[in-house]
């Protein structure tokens, strides 16, 4: 497997390396053929007849783009001057015909990159944007530490206009947040994870709320059909592995949708407990900014919003469900706002959509979007 | 008649090959070949000077001046640009 | 203008160090000339007729006064006291020694300059409207996008060894001024129906041996998707562009062979995979780069009138409308009558740097017409600026006129040229001056190339001249009707090549024929398309 950090060509590549296990293709190979050959191979060698034949760089990059994780070797007429580019294009081994003992093979290459590349380098624009985003979040947290939900949403809209959405479960507490949003920005996209496993009551309640509050841009996010067919064809995955079920039905669809957004408003509150006890109004996980305008609200304050705005309750709230997700993993529980009824009996209370590690993995299944 | 010319590696200046195998900036000091075989042999030898010069090749000369098809080019190489900033009064040099 | 951060500065220093090592490897024999040549070209070093030539990048033609002073210093210290501004908005030095180039690059790095990718089969300097950020007719400032493209295209891991060189131009104005139709990729900033800014993309244009005007391949690419779209185009070209024939290796041949629809389909297929991925430009980075390019403040001092006729003529032709009240764009012509197009002495560069600081917020531009521009001059300062330019021999009042000739170095310097360009351009320039016709003719373009590679852009000149060699004698082929900017058009050859004297006379003849035939306000190309080639041809070959 590739190990980018360790790849510094610390040892000169050996001429005519004994790597005959590899499938060798010429740099002139049409990409479709290269892709077909790579499909079953652990190792591909690309031969450069001339060092100026740049096709090999695109072949390697595109194979990596499309998920080839085996070993890639550059063979033939390649120069030490190209080592950095070859590495970045996704090669992890070089078998050069040209002066393999030259110390120039060991020179340090550029310490930054302007482009994303197969080797995983972070392009300058992402590094800069990440730093700018982190600084902005720090500033917003400082300025809005004790601000009202309205003020936080307004600030977030100003900072991320056009790149922000709200995430809503249309669960027991959702109406409060949606009502506040509807008064400030009814046109903001509202993402709903349409897992295919919701209670019928949730879907009815969703439609009722949308109509009543005048939200104009609710976007249901369905699981990918191909992924479902492969991973959960019988819709029984939850019986074997609830985390895997959440992954295919929630984590990955949200990660895909977030390609269009840089910030996400959540309804999470500190009184939910667990990981949420220290929730700040703005969070940055190195990728997306999460805005938690309701973090500081108490259960009483949420209830007050319902009363003041005469918002309808989720039909199942009165049946003893304080937190509602998909039907297989939701049970009644004791106490307002508790998530104890979610995945009851298991050591988890989060589906994973707020876990950056899971999100990163989900994002990788499609492309490498870092921000 | 033929002469071998090239550009010097270190600074790119036009040079011509001398009888002793060295290189000169002065065309009149260059070795002149009357027969193609002699010129080709010397050119093959000049190729070994790749740490001194770049791209040696043969040119036609008559009366120690460039001639033949590439006469304009080789005259300019010998004597410098025929026009340009140094000749137009644009820049006082 | 854009200022380097640590990342930019570090990369330039690392490249300079790498090039020093590459020169050392060539001198020691570790690299052969065949290996070294593509590497030195990628850093702007050519071997020309008399010496090495170093082409220094001026990204999208934007220079600070401090950078221009450094260019003057390089001209004085390492060259013969002058430099040549090019049709790609760069500058080249004709006489540096190879062994000095690493030192020159170190000096340039001190002012955030370099020679990266100014030649070679890679993505070259992105060019744009020299009036960007100043032009009264501008829709969107193209400079931030040029900078973003500059960074994306620098040391690209896939696109550093393309089939052939690759040139991108961006315009933010309907008047173009960047010749986007004759570029490998031309980008026009546009607004879609929702008012969102994005790019209309043209691909497969070019000059050279097979001139072509680029077809539009996308009417709208969103800003954040620009790099993904460019990557998709370059991938298709890098894999499918011809590598068997130098003369058929440009993207225009690929687009033409595949057909624009098939080419576009392949690009869109790859784009669909890349869109939304890591190539998506974060808004923070777009905002960061845009913040470097702000409008100058308005100037409310009253304009000072200058009584001289010479000033009035200069004001008429060399001063262009600015988008900010009280300011103007000033073109400094590097085309004195009988001079060498685009050349400037070190002293002149220093003068322009001083004047830029005094009158133009420290900013200078280079145009593809090989002139300089002070983009932000207060109307109130025009008279004072004119007097200073006049004293430095830089007040030639011919911007856009017939004597504002574009001209490549030709056989006086260039290893590829077949004929000389500079002497013929000098003779034409003098003849135009003597004819006294150019003000009457108004804006009219004359461009001269010394070979079919067309660095002098002769294909897109109203009157183009191409130098050819016929058995050791120089001849010039005339083309008429080319247009560089906006609705680009390729000029058509009038007839057989002309000897130098005849060529000079023919240019004057064509200008006279145009003046005789035109109706009021008709441009040269409009007259030509109305009356056809014959009247011109008859006059030339009479």
Image (cartoon, rainbow, N blue to C red):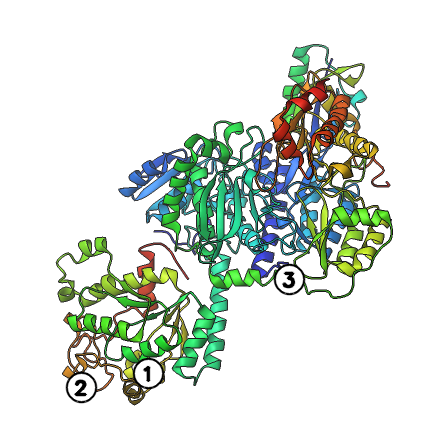
* Residue A270 circle label: 1
Q: Is residue C494 left or right of residue A254?
A: right
Q: Residue C280: percent from the left, percent from the top?
A: 43, 56
Residue holding disc 3? C295
Near-viewer residue (A87 or B76): B76
Same chain for marks 3 and 1? Answer: no
Residue holding disc 2? A334
Vertical side of A132 occupied by A61: above or below: above
Crowdedness near tag 2: few (<14), some (14–19) or many (≥20) residues, C-alpha within 10 Å: few
Residue at image point 83% right, 57% down: C305
Crowdedness near tag 1: few (<14), some (14–19) or many (≥20) residues, C-alpha within 10 Å: many
Near-viewer residue (A357 or A73): A357
Which picture quadrant has residue C278? Answer: bottom left
Q: CA distance from mark 3 to mark 1?
A: 46 Å
Q: How many marks?
A: 3
Contact, CB < 8 Å: mark 1 with mark 2?
no
Contact, CB < 8 Å: mark 3 with mark 2?
no
Contact, CB < 8 Å: mark 3 with mark 1?
no
Q: Is residue C218 left or right of residue C5?
A: left
Crowdedness near tag 3: few (<14), some (14–19) or many (≥20) residues, C-alpha within 10 Å: few
Residue at image point 17% right, 66% down: A197
Q: Circle 2 marks a residue in which chain? A: A
Q: Residue A73: percent from the left, percent from the top?
A: 39, 42
Residue A8 visible in image: no
Q: Residue C82: percent from the left, percent from the top?
A: 77, 43
Residue C91 visible in image: yes
Mark 1 vs 2, N-terminal side = 1
Vertical side of A123 occupied by A156: above or below: below
Q: Residue B18: percent from the left, percent from the top?
A: 75, 22
């Amino acid at each position: 497997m590739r190990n980018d950090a360790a790849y510094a060509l610390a040892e000169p590549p050996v001429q005519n390396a004994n790597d005959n296990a590899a499938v060798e293709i010429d740099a002139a190979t049409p990409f479709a053929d290269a892709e077909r050959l790579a499909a079953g191979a652990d190792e591909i060698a690309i031969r450069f007849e001339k060092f100026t034949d740049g096709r090999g760089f695109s072949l390697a990059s595109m194979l990596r783009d499309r998920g080839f994780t085996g070993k890639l070797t550059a063979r033939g007429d390649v120069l030490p001057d190209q080592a950095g580019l070859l590495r970045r294009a996704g090669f992890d081994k070089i078998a050069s015909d040209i002066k393999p003992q030259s110390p120039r093979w060991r020179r340090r290459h550029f310490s930054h990159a302007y482009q994303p590349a197969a080797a995983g380098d972070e392009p300058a624009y992402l590094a800069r944007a990440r730093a700018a985003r982190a600084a902005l979040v720090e500033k917003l947290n400082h300025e809005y530490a004790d601000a009202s939900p309205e003020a936080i949403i307004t600030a977030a809209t100003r900072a991320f206009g056009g790149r922000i959405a709200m995430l809503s479960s249309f669960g027991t507490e959702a109406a409060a947040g949606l009502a506040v949003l509807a008064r400030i920005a009814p046109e903001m996209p509202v993402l709903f994870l349409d897992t295919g496993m919701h209670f019928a009551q949730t879907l009815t309640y969703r439609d009722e709320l949308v109509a009543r509050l005048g939200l104009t841009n609710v976007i249901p996010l369905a699981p990918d059909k191909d992924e479902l067919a492969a991973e959960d064809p019988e819709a029984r995955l939850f019986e074997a592995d609830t985390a895997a079920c959440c992954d295919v039905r929630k984590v990955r669809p949200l990660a895909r949708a977030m390609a269009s957004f840089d910030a996400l408003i959540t309804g999470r509150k500190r009184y939910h407990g667990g990981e949420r006890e220290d929730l700040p109004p703005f969070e940055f996980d190195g990728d997306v900014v999460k805005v938690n305008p309701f973090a500081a609200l108490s259960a009483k304050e949420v209830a007050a919003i319902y009363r003041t705005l005469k918002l309808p309750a989720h039909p199942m709230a009165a049946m003893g469900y304080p937190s509602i997700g998909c039907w297989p993993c939701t049970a009644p529980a004791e106490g307002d706002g508790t998530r104890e009824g979610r995945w009851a009996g298991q050591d988890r209370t989060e589906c994973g959509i707020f876990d950056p590690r899971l999100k990163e993995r989900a994002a990788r299944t499609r492309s490498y979007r870092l921000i | 008649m033929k002469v071998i010319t090239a550009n010097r590696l270190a600074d790119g200046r036009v040079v011509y090959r001398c009888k002793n195998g060295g290189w000169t900036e002065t065309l009149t000091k260059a070795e002149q070949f009357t027969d193609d075989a002699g010129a080709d042999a010397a050119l093959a030898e000049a190729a070994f000077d790749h740490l001194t010069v770049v791209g040696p090749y043969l040119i036609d000369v008559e009366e120690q001046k460039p001639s033949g098809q590439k006469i304009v080019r080789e005259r300019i190489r010998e004597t410098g640009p025929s026009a340009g900033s140094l000749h137009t009064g644009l820049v006082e040099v | 203008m854009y200022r380097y951060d640590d990342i930019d500065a570090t990369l330039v220093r690392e490249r300079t160090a790498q090039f020093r090592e590459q020169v050392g490897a060539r001198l020691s024999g570790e690299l052969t000339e065949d290996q070294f040549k593509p590497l030195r070209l990628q850093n702007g070093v050519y071997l020309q007729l008399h010496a090495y030539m170093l082409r220094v990048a001026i990204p999208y033609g934007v220079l600070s006064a401090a950078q221009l002073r450094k260019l003057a210093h390089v001209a004085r210290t390492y060259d013969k006291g002058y430099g040549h501004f090019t049709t790609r908005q760069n500058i080249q030095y004709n006489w540096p020694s190879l062994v000095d180039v690493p030192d020159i690059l170190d000096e340039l790095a001190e002012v955030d300059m370099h020679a990266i990718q100014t030649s070679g089969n890679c993505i070259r300097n992105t060019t744009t409207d020299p009036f960007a950020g100043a032009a009264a007719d501008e829709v969107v400032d193209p400079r931030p996008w040029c900078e973003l493209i500059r960074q994306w295209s620098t040391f690209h891991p896939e696109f550093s060894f393309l089939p052939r060189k690759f040139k991108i131009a961006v315009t933010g104005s309907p008047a173009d001024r960047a010749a986007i139709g004759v570029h490998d990729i031309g980008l026009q900033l546009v607004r879609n129906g929702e008012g969102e800014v994005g790019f209309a993309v043209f691909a497969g244009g070019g000059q050279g041996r097979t001139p072509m005007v680029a077809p539009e391949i996308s009417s709208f690419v969103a800003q954040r998707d620009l790099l993904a779209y460019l990557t998709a185009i370059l991938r298709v070209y890098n894999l499918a562009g011809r590598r068997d024939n130098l003369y058929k290796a440009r993207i225009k041949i690929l687009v033409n062979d595949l057909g624009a629809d098939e080419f576009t389909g392949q690009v869109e297929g790859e784009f669909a995979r890349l869109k939304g991925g890591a190539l998506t430009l974060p808004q923070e980075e777009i905002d960061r780069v845009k913040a470097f390019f702000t409008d100058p403040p308005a100037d409310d001092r009253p304009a000072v009138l200058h009584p001289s006729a010479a000033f009035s003529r200069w004001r008429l032709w060399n001063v262009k409308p600015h988008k900010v009240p009280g300011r103007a764009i000033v073109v400094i012509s590097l085309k004195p009558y009988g001079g060498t197009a685009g050349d400037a002495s070190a002293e002149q560069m220093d003068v322009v740097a001083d004047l830029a600081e005094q009158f133009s917020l420290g900013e200078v531009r280079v145009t593809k017409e090989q002139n300089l521009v002070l983009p932000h001059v207060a109307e109130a300062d025009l008279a004072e600026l004119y007097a200073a330019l006049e004293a430095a021999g830089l007040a030639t009042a011919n911007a856009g006129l017939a004597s504002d000739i574009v001209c490549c170095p030709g056989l006086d310097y260039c290893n590829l040229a077949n004929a000389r360009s500079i002497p013929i351009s000098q003779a034409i320039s003098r003849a135009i001056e003597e004819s006294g016709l150019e003000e009457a003719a108004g804006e009219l373009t004359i461009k001269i190339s010394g070979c079919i590679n067309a660095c002098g852009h002769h294909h897109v000149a109203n009157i183009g001249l191409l130098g050819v060699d016929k058995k050791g004698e120089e001849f010039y082929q005339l083309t008429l009707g080319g247009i560089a900017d906006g609705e680009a058009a390729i000029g058509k050859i009038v007839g057989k090549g002309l000897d130098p004297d005849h060529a000079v006379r023919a240019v004057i003849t064509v200008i006279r024929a145009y003046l005789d035939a035109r109706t009021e306000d008709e441009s040269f190309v409009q007259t030509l398309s109305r009356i056809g080639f014959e009247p011109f041809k008859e006059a030339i070959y009479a």
